[in-house]
Amino acid sequence: MKFSVGVEYAIHCLLYMVNIDKSIGIKDLAKFQGISETYLSKVYTKLTKKKIVMSVPGVKGGYALARKAEEITFWDIVEAVEGEESFFQCAEIRQNNILLDKENLPKEYTECPCLIKVVMLEAENEMKKYLSNKTLAWLYDEVYHKKLSKNAEEDMLEWFHRG
């Protein structure tokens, strides 16, 4: 399993929006992070559909968070960018076993869930639970209040307010 770069783009750029009291344009977000404006625009379309960000029209328009940073989880972002479909798609290949009578498959192959599927979905649920406990507010606090200097936060805020 691999997340697309869109998840990383989204989380980084949403992080910058946490403490900004105005909308930010895609052009500014892409320039600040040094990433593709075109690709980021597609990512933000997905984030808008999931009501993580809202589009602000007008000359000074752009995007703003649609919810409080405490209410936006990493899982919300992953699901918005990657879609809601389960990562593991069981194709029931156990029923293709050459030794089985295809006309009269045993109950073990038709009525009980595939153990591989069960394990994979349990793992996905654990990841979902973990990512649902990490929010943009948590990330902002970790990055700007524990990892970087106060100047880093102020510099970032100033850069976006000039834009």
Image (cartoon, grey):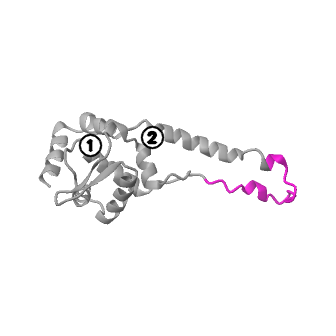
Q: Amino acid at mark 1?
A: Val
In the displayed orientation, state which residue is furthest to the bottom.
38
Q: Secondary structure at mark 1?
A: loop
Which region of the structure is painted magenta?
89-109
Residue 70: which numbered mark, if any?
none
The one nearer the camera, 70 or 60, is 60
In the picture as drawn, the residue positioned furthest to the front comes out as 57
Residue 38, placed above or below residue 86: below
- Could you tell whether 6 is left or right of 33 in the image? right
Query: Which kind of residue does numbered mark 2 sit on?
Result: Leu
Q: Position of residue 137 (x, y in %)?
A: 31, 37
* Cα gap from disc 1 to disc 2, whole angstroms: 18 Å
Q: Identify which residue is drawn at 26% across, 47% down.
A: 16
Residue 75 image offset from top left, x and y in percent: 44, 44
- Identify the image quadrant of the C terminus: bottom left
**Count of marks placed on residues:** 2
Q: Residues within 10 Å of mark 1 (few under 14, many from 20)?
A: some
Residue at (71% x, 55% y) in the render: 92
Residue 86: % across, % down: 56, 51
Q: Is residue 9 magenta?
A: no
97 magenta-colored: yes
Q: Residues within 10 Å of mark 2 (few under 14, many from 20)?
A: some
- Reading the image, the residue beneath label 2 is 131
Residue 144, picture quadrant: top left
User: Depth-wise, is mark 1 or mark 2 nearer the camera?
Assistant: 1
Instruction: Identify the residue position indicated by label 1 in the image.
Output: 18
